[in-house]
Image (cartoon, coloured by chain):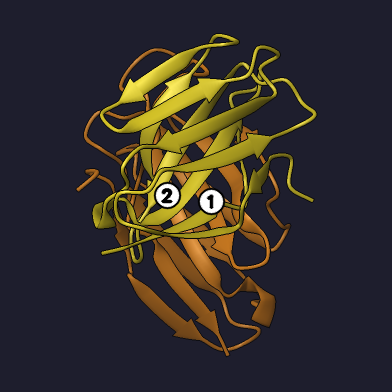
Amino acid sequence: TQLLEQSPQFLSIQEGENLTVYCNSSSVFSSLQWYRQEPGEGPVLLVTVVTGGEVKKLKRLTFQFGDARKDSSLHITAAQPGDTGLYLCAGVANDYKLSFGAGTTVTVRA
Amino acid sequence: DSGVTQTPKHLITATGQRVTLRCSPRSGDLSVYWYQQSLDQGLQFLIQYYNGEERAKGNILERFSAQQFPDLHSELNLSSLELGDSALYFCASSVPDGVGTSTDTQYFGPGTRLTVL
């Protein structure tokens, strides 16, 4: 059983559309991280959110940390084929261990 | 390129065998983490070393062990291999100094794909 539940598991959209990926847990985290992983490579950190209610923007990507620090969302505006990949959320507990969600596979069709 | 190197890239072996995976962290990073990624379990934290000492343990089997050497490279030893051990094994490094915080960035290597036949 995953500590962090990600939804949806798969997402296939047309270039230019928007998408949102969700990451939920019953546990409180000191911070939450989002990674993107491409085939044959390791995950790459996109962002770390620390404060409940925090919103961070990275170009067309918007990350939000829930007020209770139990959930997060990733929103991509006007998706491009280069956004294709496996998106992973990871919660950081007080012991600094990362607990990963199962991931959302995003495919953006040209 | 994250600066973390892992060897070998691919490893094919038989059940019951023992293998060693190697990781070189980014220059100056003191912490090394090992993860296992499989289709059914996702990315699971196995173990962390900090400056040669074991710092944290996750879902690591007793058949698996790791160590970090004085030059900070790390090895993950997997023994009595089973079919279910087939997975991608990632190493990550972080923390060039200090003891680490919950917002540290972990830099992942490209992984070793282990196939147990």
Mark identifier at residue B35:
1
- Circles 1 and 2 on the same chain: yes
Q: Residue at x 40, y 34 (%)?
A: B106
Which quadrant of the rendered structure holds the C terminus of chain B?
bottom right
For mark 1, name the chain: B
Q: Which amino acid does label 1 sit on?
A: Tyr
Q: B44 and A11: which one is in front?
A: A11
Q: Is residue B58 left or right of residue A36?
A: right
Residue density around tag 1, few if under 14, some if 14–19, many if 20 or more, within 10 Å? many
Q: Which chain is orange?
A: B
Q: What residue type is labelled 2?
A: Cys
Q: Residue B54 in the image: state x and y as whole percent.
A: 57, 34
Q: Which residue is drawn at 34% across and 66% down?
A: A40
Q: Residue at x 65, y 83 (%)?
A: B16
Say which quarter of the image contains residue B80. bottom right
**Among numbered discs 1 and 2, the one appearing first in the sequence:** 1
Q: In this view, does A58 lie to the left or right of A70?
A: left
Circle count: 2
